[in-house]
Structures are given as C-alpha cells and as structure tokens.
Amino acid sequence: MRSCPRLALLCALLPWLLRAAAPRRPAQPLPSRDPRDPARGADFDRVYSGVVSLSTENIYSFNYTSQPGQVNAVRVYVNSSSENLDYPVLVVVRQQKGVLSWQVPLLFQGLYQRTYNYQEVSRTLCPSEATNETGPLEQLVFVDVASMAPLGAQYKLLVTKIKHFQLQTNVAFHFTASPSQPQKKDFPGEQFFVVFVIKPEDYACGGSFFIQEKENQTWNLQRTKNLKVTIVPSIKGSVYVKSILLSSLIFFSFYLGCLLIAFVHYIRFQRKSIDGSFGSSDGSENMVASHPIAAGTPEGSNYGAIEESSSSPGRQMSSSDGGQTCQSDTDSSVEESDFDTMPDIESDKNVVRTKMFLYLSDLSRKDRRIVSKKYKIYFWNIVTIAVFYALPVIQLVITYQTVANVTGNQDICYYNFLCAHPLGVLSAFNNILSNLGHVLLGFLFLLIVLRRDILHRRALEAKDIFAMEYGIPKHFGVFYAMGIALMMEGVLSACYHVCPNYSNFQFDTSFMYMIAGLCMLKLYQTRHPDINASAYAAYASFAAVITLTVLGVVFGKNDLWFWVIFSAIHILVSLALSTQIYYMGRFKIVVSSADLGIFRRAAMVFYTDFFHQCSRPLYMDRMVLLIVGNLVNWSFALFGLVYRPRDFASYMLGIFICNLLLYLAFYIIMKLRSSEKLLPIPLFCIVATALMWAASLYFFFQNLSSWEGTPAESREKNRECILLDFFDDHDVWHFLSATALFFSFLLLLTLDDDLDVVRRDQIPVF
C-alpha cells in the first residue's frame, strides 16, 4: 500500500518526461498578414477604402526601417465623403513614442462663430531618428479608423513616406499647404522642426472678411497656399564684434573732435591773453549802426518806454554800479520770493514789456542767481521723471522678452525678422545697439555744457564785466535737461526695441516730445530769460501731450468725436500761446461774477492793435511769426480731422518738430536781420543738422514693421540688413537721428556766441 503514492507520482510525471526526451523541432514563424486584410499589415503609397460604423473598426499597420543619419517622415491622408457632423470619422495614429488623433470632417471656428468644414485631412508624424549607437530601427505605425455612425461612414486612407522632408541651407523649397493639411519640415544638425499652418480666414492675418449670409453654414472650402521656405545661416560672431566696435568708434570720434576744438579755443584764448587784446573793447561802438531797427526808430514811437539808463523799481543793479559786488554768487541762499514783492513791480513789467522795441536788458532784470536756480529745476525734474519712468519700463520689457523666449510665440514682438540678430536673451540686439549713439552723444553734450558752466562761474567769481553785462545771460539748467533727455531717449528706445508692440510704443516717443518742447523753451528763453515758463508748467504740459497721444492711439483710428475734440483743443491752445507770446505774458483776463465783459475787452484789444494802428500790428515781427505758426497748426488740425492718420504718435511728433523748425528758422532770420553774425561753429551745426535730419527722415519712413496691423501684415514689411550685414534701415535712423539731435543741441548752445561782446541793452528781443 505504501508504493501506491509513488506509482501515482510516476504516472503524473511520465508525460512531461516523454515530451522533454523527445527531439525538439524549430519554432514556426507567425503567419504573415494578408495586405488585403485592413485589420492587418498595410503598404505605403496605397489607397485603402472602407466603411466604419458603431460596430466596425479598422486598424492598419505600417512598418519601415530607419537608418542612422537618415530621417524618414510619414504623412497620413484621410478623406471622407460623409457630411454628417454628428458622426465624424475618427482617426487615431499610434507610434512608438506618441499618439495623434483627429476627425473627418474637420471643423474650424471662424469669425462670428462661422464654421469651416474640411473633408480631407492630412498630418505629418514625428519621426524617430536612428543613431549610430542604436543602429537601424524598426518603426511600426498603427492607424485606427473608427466612427460612431449607426449606418456607417465611408473613408479613404493613404500613408506615404515624405521624400523631401529635410531642408538644406540656402536651398529654397516649394510646397503647398492648407488649413486642414499643415506641413512640417525638419532641419538637420542642431535639429528643429518648421511647421506651416494655414488659417481658414484672411481676417486672422489682417485681411478683410465679407459675410454673404447672416446664418452660419458649413462647407468645404478649397483653400491652399503656395509657399517657399529657405534656411539661411546666421551671421558669425565676428560680425557682432565688428558692428559693436565700429558703432562705438564712430561716436567716440565725436569726443575726439570736441577735445580738438576745445584745445584750439584754449590756445587762442592764451594768445589773446598774452597779447592783451581780449576785452580791450566793449563792443558798444559797433552796435549803434548794427541795429537798423533801433537806429531808424522815429521820435515818439517808443510811447510807454523807459529810458535804458534809468533805474526803475525792482531792477537789479549791475556790478559796475556796485549793487552786487558784496553778494555771494551761490544759489543756495536765495529764493524766488526775494523779488517781485512790491505792487509797483507789476506795473513796471507792464511798462517794460509793452515797449515797441525791446532789448535784452528789459527782459533780464531779475537776479541772475534766482533765475539760474529756477532753470535748474528743469534738470532735477527730468532726472526724477527719468528714474520713475525707466524702472517700470525696464521691468516690463524684461517680462515681454522672457515670455517670448519661453513660449516661442513670435507674434508678441514686432521685429524686422529679416534683420533681427539675437544675442543672449535678446531677440534683436542690433536694434538695441544702434541706440548707443543717443547715450554717448547725450553724455558728451552734458560734458560740453558743464565746461561752459564752469568757465562762466569762474568769470562771475572774477567779476568779469563781459559775463555780467554782455551777451545772452547764461542759464544752463535747460541745457542739462536736454542732455539727460537725449540719453534717456536712447535708453527707452532700446527698451522699446527689446519687444516692439502696441503696449510700449510710448516709451521713447514720450521723451521725443520732451526734447522738442525743451528745445523750443530754450530758444524762447534765450532772449526772454525773465518770462519763460516754469519747469512745473512745462512738464505738466508734456504730461498732457503724452496723455493726448495715448488717447489718440486708442481712439484716433475710427472715432470722429476724438478728432473733433482734439482739433478744437489744438486750435485753442495755439491761439492762447500766440496771445501770451505776442504780449510777452502781460495779457490776462480775470473772470469774476460781477465782470462779464471779457469778450468785449478782447475785441477792443484786437481793434486797437489792428485797426486803430492803421492796420499795422504794434509788434510786426512777432505777428508774422504767430500768423505763420497758427496757419501751420491749423493745417495740422484740419489734416487730422479730414484724414485721421492711423499713426497718431508720429502725427503728434510731426506737430512738435514743425513748430520747432518754424521757430528756429524765424530766430535765425531775425538774428540776421539784426545784423548779428553766425560764427563758424553754429554755421557748421546748421548745415550738419539739416543734412543729418534730411538723411535720417528718409530712413525713418522706411517702415520695416508696424504694430498697428497684425503680425502677418508686419512681416510683409520686413527687409534685409543694409549696413555691415547687421543693421537695418531703422538702425541707420537711430544713428543719424542721434547725430542730428546732437548738432541741434550744439546749435542752440552756440548760436549767440557772437553776442558775448555786445551789451545787453543793445541786443534786440524777437
């Protein structure tokens, strides 16, 4: 009985032992799949047709071998004649490392909820590239076609290998694409893919859109685009180095030129000091005949004037009279409340400033230290504005650049992509580098002004009569502000070009307005030092202009009401400024509840000046300037109201520039009429300024991009580089405009150097 379990165990193991002892036969391969069976293997370049439904699903298997160094891409085409949008054909493609799916018909959502139905869809599959380490790779692709249609949906399937998938350097490739059939291309080496997607509507790329019917429809829109793509190599590092060095050397050469001129002036001054000829003549003997206006004045025509030699109340005594010899020349101990505290001074202003023929001594009666301190506020205010303005700007553009780099969205920033050279995190380094001239030349101008300021202070400390009573009164506060504005223009222009777009256009244009305004104020201050606008009023006016510019960009494209209001404001401001300039700031209308005769008094003033004076204005030269200026400004207002230009920022800048050029031309003409001279340096600055501005404006109007349209419309304006294969037209505008502004500033600084030996009571005011 004990042997029974052993027998049972032997019987159980016997079949297994027999199979193990039997000779082995080779393993049989799996049965090959029939290509005609859609559920099994399939061939490339062969069209497969079928019907899928709720109960039927077809799976196709494609395999190929990928060799090292060779990229094989596969494209899948699916077409369906079914227009039943509730039961589309569903396509799922499975690869080794990814899944891709879509439906046919493919629907795109357009404008106003309009739909587009595409019944043929194709996609390019991401290839798996074999390497030398892995050797040849067997690639397997499954295409699953299904539908939830209860009655079935027909389809056609085609899978092909793309022959020209890899792009080559400097070789153009032509192909077509559609909204339902985007293209993907590969570039070898440091590999990246180029994908071309077509939008179903032109409106998405800035085109027009026309609705024929109110109700939404779906239809098969046959929309294809013929494309050409070319991959070109980026510039070498040596081009960067050459461009940086050359642009720096060009602007540092200005420093060298200024040093040479300063050295020449120093040598001439030393020679005059040795010869004893400097200051030997007061220049007054030449000025009686040099002012034909004053010489030809008939007796009695200076009604209301005061004698030039008389000492009126409130007038500061010159050093020659002993009035200021004991005063300190520092500005810290004086306040603006130190003058104009007596009521009779106001009446004295009215008498002096309404003379028929004014001289500089009439409008430079206030204490020099107080006026100089007043103009220094221009400098400190613009420094404060620059700091508070620039810091958030820099923070914002860094955010823009970071978002563009992380997302890869090239529609955020409106570059000239045909000439945008990156460096580090910056996408268009060349547009930033070209603003170097504003910073360097602005700093150079500050050094020139500082030198003049130091020399003038030394002359005042030495009680030099030429510094105290001759020439234009030297106040450098506005000049310092102009230099800071030029430097900040370069900084903020560079910030704008980090990522040019609709949201940051006002970064650099704001300081353009301030530069133009400061130049006009300085030109007016030259011969009206006592009645120029305060820094607070000037910068408040600039703030109002910038606010109007922002409103114009937002509302000025299509809203007629904005242009009506803006044109009215423009004309009224022109008239108000003209009145203040014509009457030297002495025309005031005080409104009270018991006095409603404002308009009657204004009409009386108009009648007195134009009709009672035998149709001849009391101040003819000023009247001519103001009439021409008003005609120009009214023309601008009318042009804006009729044509409503899209680029409102440039339109506003054009108003400022035209007024500045008009005033500068008037000043130079009146200077020549008064028999004053143009020394070689200001004459050279006039010629250089004209040439530089003419050339720079040519390049300014070469629009290379525009954030006013869509990114696609902006790219249509892109152009190749024109300078050193690195800088485009707009970069050249930066170079030339910086140079033009520098020469313009030098012109204002040196324009009246010929009057340094002329007494102020012989320098006419115009």
Image (cartoon, helix red, strand yellow):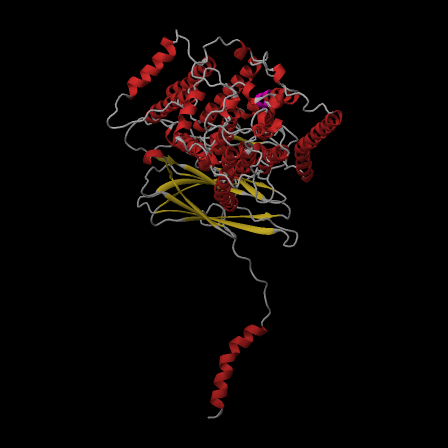
Which secondary structure dominates the residues rendered in magenta?
helix
- From this viewpoint, which residue is outermost toward the bottom? 1
Q: Which of 54 and 330 lies nearest the eye of the viewer?
A: 330
Where is residue 599 drawn, in percent x and y? Answer: 29, 19
Quadrant in which residue 318 is drawn? top right
**In the rendered image, the vertical position of residue 370 relative to residue 569, given as above or below:** below
Was residue 693 drawn as part of the magenta stretch in this picture? Answer: yes
What is the number of callouts on the image?
Answer: 0
Residue shown at the point (52%, 17%) measured from the top left: 666
Taking the spot 57% from the left edge, 32% from the top edge, the residue there is 418
Would residue 714 be seen by someone viewing this image from the given angle? no
Q: Is residue 157 left or right of residue 676?
A: left
Q: Of 178 and 741, which appears nearest the observer? A: 741
Please name the residue shown 53% across and 46% down the image. Answer: 126
Position in image of residue 476 (x %, y %): 56, 32
Question: Percent position (x, y) of residue 182?
Answer: 48, 37
Query: Is residue 403 a member of the stretch shown in magenta?
Result: no
Name the spot of residue 501 as percent of width and height, x first. 47, 36
| Residue positioned most to the top | 614
Q: Is residue 389 above or below residue 657?
A: below
Task: Using the image, determine if residue 608 lies above or below residue 428.
Answer: above
Question: Which residue sits furthest left?
Answer: 594
Q: Is residue 645 above or below residue 160?
A: above
> Which quadrant of the view contains residue 305?
top left
Of residue 744 and residue 644, the one placed in the foreground of this image is 744
Residue 689 visible? The answer is: yes
- Tell me which segment is drawn in magenta: 690-695
